[in-house]
Image: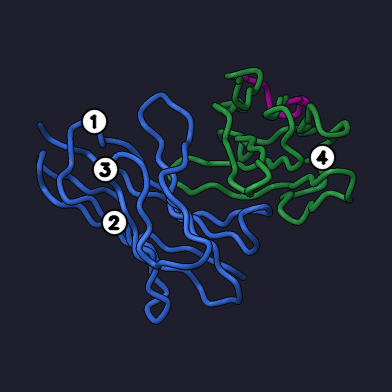
Amino acid sequence: GAGVSQSPSNKVTEKGKDVELRCDPISGHTALYWYRQRLGQGLEFLIYFQGNSAPDKSGLPSDRFSAERTGESVSTLTIQRTQQEDSAVYLCASSSPSGTQYFGPGTRLTVT
Amino acid sequence: AQSVSQHNHHVILSEAASLELGCNYSYGGTVNLFWYVQYPGQHLQLLLKYFSGDPLVKGIKGFEAEFIKSKFSFNLRKPSVQWSDTAEYFCARGPNFGNEKLTFGTGTRLTIIP
């Protein structure tokens, strides 16, 4: 079966523009996570969706960041008015019933 | 706040050498521990995980890790590394069977010299 997929794989945008990043989780996975990895750093949790429960947004760094998920399918992470410090690899993961998180290939965002 | 520390930022070994990568986690209730690996150009993938039971956990590709509660450690080991083990290794902890946000260490880059 297919793994977690993300699009685009690379995104270059100008400072101040909005961007949307997409994640397609593994079919049947109830939980979906977004993480961010800045250069030379570990993965930083952003947001977590579990079924129909309210998402855990505790990791979002500012109100410029938001994410949506439709049911147990696709999720979109939106960054408004991008800043240079938003440059990072944005990783999505989905969780099997056993709880193991499976990661996608990431979207490399560069803000110029 | 939960935290994970990986003190080795870059490790260079020759093939057949033994490997031990350090991972320490902060105290804080139930702990579930993971090692993930990212080979060059590939996704993060799970090497092994510890939820409960036997503190010595065996994973893929000959890797193992030992949960030592008294030391708050979960070091990754392999008795004899191969060139193909060149990758970045991340230790992570989760609060509840991994089905919630993971806290990652900063990663250790492993370079194996043929």
**Identity of the amino acid at label 3?**
Leu
- Identify the disc placed on residue B84: 1
Q: Are marks 2 and 3 in contact (CB under 8 Å)?
A: yes
Magenta range: A11-21
Labelled pair 4, 2 in contact (Cβ < 8 Å): no
Residue on which the image places disc 4: A66
The Cα atoms of the two marked residues, 4 and 2, are separated by 36 Å
Q: CA distance from mark 4 to mark 3?
A: 35 Å
Kindly identify which numbered label has been placed on residue B62: none
Q: Which chain is green?
A: A
Badge nearest the viewer, 4 or 3: 3
Disc 1 and disc 3 on one polypeptide chain: yes
Label 2 to label 3: alpha-carbon separation: 9 Å
Q: Is residue B113 magenta?
A: no
Identify which residue is drawn at 53% across, 41% down: A38
Label 1 sits on what residue type? Ser
- The secondary structure type at the circle numbered 4 is strand
Chain under callout 4: A
Quarter occupied by residue B42: top left
Question: Mark 1 to mark 4: distance in Å?
Answer: 38 Å
- The residue to which callout 2 is attached is B21
Q: Say which residue appears at 58% left-offset and 37% top-offset.
A: A102
Image vertical order of residue A107 relative to residue B113, above or below: above
Residue at image location 61% in from the left, 40% down from the top? A85
- Give coordinates of residue A68: x percent, y percent: 84, 35
Q: Can residue B71 be seen?
A: yes
Which image quadrant: the C terminus of chain A?
top right
